[in-house]
Amino acid sequence: MKKLLKEPFFHFILIGIVLFLIYGMVSNKTNSKNTILINDFDISNIISKWEMQWKRAPTEKELQNLIASNIKQEIFYQEALNMNLDHNDEIIKRRLAQKMQFLSNDIAYLKEPTQIELKEYYKTHAEKYLTPNPYSLYQITFSPDKRKDNYKDALETLKQFPNASFDEMQQWGDKLPFAYFFDNVNANALGLQLGSKFPEGIENQELNK
């Protein structure tokens, strides 16, 4: 055993194993930090913020730009953290201190409501606890990015094919990277994907039976 420990080849193998293990640990850590995931929840938040500001849903091109901007911001954020730019920054310290103050104030005023208070609150705000209406529908899109007058094209198509099936109508719409069929989706989720005014627009529409 002592003779083996003195062999240069054994030292070479041992060093190689250590380097391999270190590289694996660093590589996995780096890859996880450099991964940016944009899921459906993130996209719904992006769309909601846009609708709050502009009172309409973003177009396909606008949504792509918003997602790209969000990814760019996340890249800069992660690089700033890697460079420790958040350390000794008075603005960041002040902002975090404000957040902690708001959280501590909210927690300080929290108290468990009584059964009577809960019942009274429910009676006053009963409409907030109603289950949103579910909808199943197809959407055929006439994009303003691909047409001069998308609203006019949509009306003319409906007039020309008033009793056409979805398969017949689909060929007249524009292809978009979004779902074209919604199955039993509630009004809130539908509003996040297609705009807050969309559920309101179909609420009083006559349904096919």
Image (tube, helix red, strand yellow):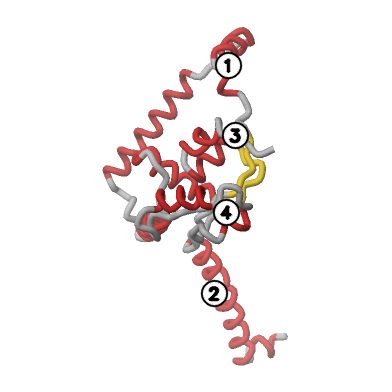
* Front: mark 4 or 1: 4
Nearer the N terminus, badge 4 or badge 3?
A: 4
Quadrant holding the C terminus: top right
Which one is closest to the eye, mark 4 or mark 2?
Answer: 4
Q: How many marks?
A: 4
Gap between marks 4 and 1 measured at Cα: 43 Å
Question: Badge 3: how crowded within 10 Å, few (<14), some, or many (20+)?
Answer: few
Q: Earlier in the sequence, mark 3 or mark 2?
A: 2
Residue under label 3, please give it: 206
Question: In front: mark 3 or mark 1?
Answer: 3
| Numbered badge on residue 32 | none
Amino acid on which the number 4 mark rests in the picture: Ala
Residue at numbered disc 2: 23
Q: CA distance from mark 3 to mark 2?
A: 64 Å
Label 4 close to label 2 by CB (< 8 Å)? no
Tell me whether the residue at label 1 lies in contact with that at label 2, contact meaning CB atoms closer than 8 angstroms: no
**Mark 4 / mark 1, whichever is N-terminal:** 1
- Tag shown at residue 179: 4
